[in-house]
Amino acid sequence: MHLVGFENGRWNAAEFGFDGVVVSNHDRISRSRLPSLIGKVRRRVLRSPTLSPLLGKLKHGPLHTYRYEDAMKFFLEDGTVSEYYPCIIPNWDNTPRSGMHGVVLTGSTPELFRRHLRDGLAKVAPYPGERRLVFLKSWNEWAEGNYVEPDVRFGMEYLAVIRDEVSRSRGGERGAAAEVCAAEEMGDRRG
């Protein structure tokens, strides 16, 4: 048995008997110094004597909007105390649940996702075959704009990226594949 827990900085999974951790850093972006697209607009509005009073009428606070390409560097962990399994993120928009405090990633494309997935697969390449796990957040989290399921805009391109990159990571060796496990909300929902 190999137990993998979700680590979010508030607890250490290894202390509780877990062999490894999954870290989903989509929320780490808003704690970074990466300027949000809305933040740039906000600063310009604050400089305008005409528009500045309107800004104060926003009810809840800033909406954090970032370019997917800029945010990618925050997705994967550089190192943790436990064995680390990357969680790849095809896109993100949790404003339906979090309102103005949500985080929105814009401009995700299958090719940018390919770079992110390739980096995730490289993180687990040194692990034994049975532990080369990469978690996908999420297969069809439509409410958070986070899915790889076919859609009108990109069709099956995200799925093709997964197929191609997993195949590439195998390098012809059957046991050397990184297994991509669909994870929703950090748990496996089996019907």
Image (cartoon, rainbow, N blue to C red):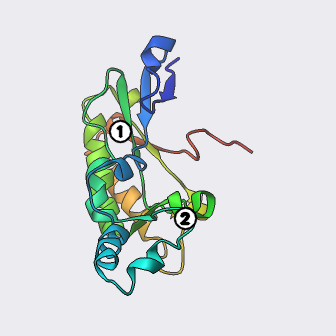
Q: Label 1: few (<14), some or many (≥20) within 10 Å?
A: few
The answer to which quarter of the image holds residue 66 is bottom left
The answer to which quarter of the image holds residue 141 is bottom right
Nearer to us in this view, 77 or 124: 77
Q: Are marks 2 and 1 in contact (CB under 8 Å)?
A: no
Of labels 2 and 1, earlier in sequence is: 2
Residue 102 in the image: x percent, y percent?
A: 51, 59
> What residue lies at 35% left-to-right and 72% top-to-bottom?
42
Residue 168 in the image: x percent, y percent?
A: 28, 52
Q: Specify the label residue 67 is tagged with.
A: none
Nearer to us in this view, 60 or 11: 60
- Tally the marks: 2
> What residue lies at 43% left-to-right and 16% top-to-bottom?
14
Report helix, strand or loop for mark 2.
loop
The answer to which quarter of the image holds residue 49 is bottom left
Residue 60 in the image: x percent, y percent?
A: 55, 62
Q: CA distance from mark 2 to mark 1?
A: 26 Å
Report helix, strand or loop for mark 1.
helix
Q: Label 2: few (<14), some or many (≥20) within 10 Å?
A: some
Q: Quadrant of the C terminus?
A: top right
Q: Find disc 2 in the rendering and name its residue.
A: 149
Instruction: Judge from the rendering whether residue 76 lies leftward or rightward of residue 91; answer left or right.
Output: left
Q: Amino acid at mark 2?
A: Glu
Q: Amino acid at mark 1?
A: Arg
Residue 58 in the image: x percent, y percent?
A: 53, 71
Task: From this view, report whether residue 167 is shown above or below residue 13.
Answer: below
Nearer to us in this view, 2 or 64: 64
Q: Specify the label residue 174 is tagged with.
A: 1
> What residue lies at 35% left-to-right and 40% top-to-bottom?
177
